[in-house]
Image (spheres, rainbow, N blue to C red):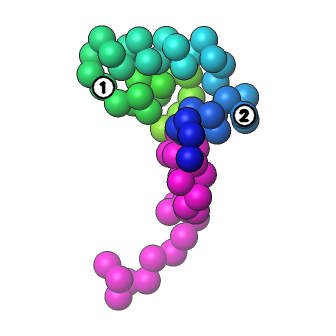
Amino acid sequence: MAGDFTEILLQKKIISPEQIVEARTLQQQTGTKLQDAIVELGFTTAEEVVAAIAEFHNLPFIHLTDMTIPASVM
């Protein structure tokens, strides 16, 4: 699979190519992860980034706040 999760964010028009460049610059300057740089710069939410990462890897993204976890699991 070519590229990375940022392609998903671009396709969905969540962030722009210029914002990705800015986030990559911050990543290189600070050593932070790209996904953290995108959120830190305020370009999108952590939830949207994680959803894009999940989609990129063909994994489901589940909102745990929408689920009831049985007491026996906890």
Q: Is residue 60 left or right of residue 46?
A: right
**Percent position (x, y) of residue 72?**
35, 88
Residue 64 versus residue 42 in the image, above or below: below
Give the label on residue 61, or none: none
- Residue 70 lies within the magenta run: yes
Residue 47 appears in view: no
Label 2 – label 1 distance at C-alpha: 24 Å
Q: Which residues are magenta?
A: 49-74
**Percent position (x, y) of residue 32?**
30, 25
In percent of the image, x 66 and y 19: which residue is there? 16
In percent of the image, x 63 and y 17: which residue is there? 17
Q: Quadrant of residue 37?
A: top left
Task: Name the residue furthest left.
Answer: 31
Q: Which residue is mark 2?
A: 11
Give whichever of discs 2 and 1 has the lower sequence position.
Answer: 2
Q: Give neighbour class at mark 2: few <14, some 14-19, many 20+ (Cα, 10 Å).
A: few
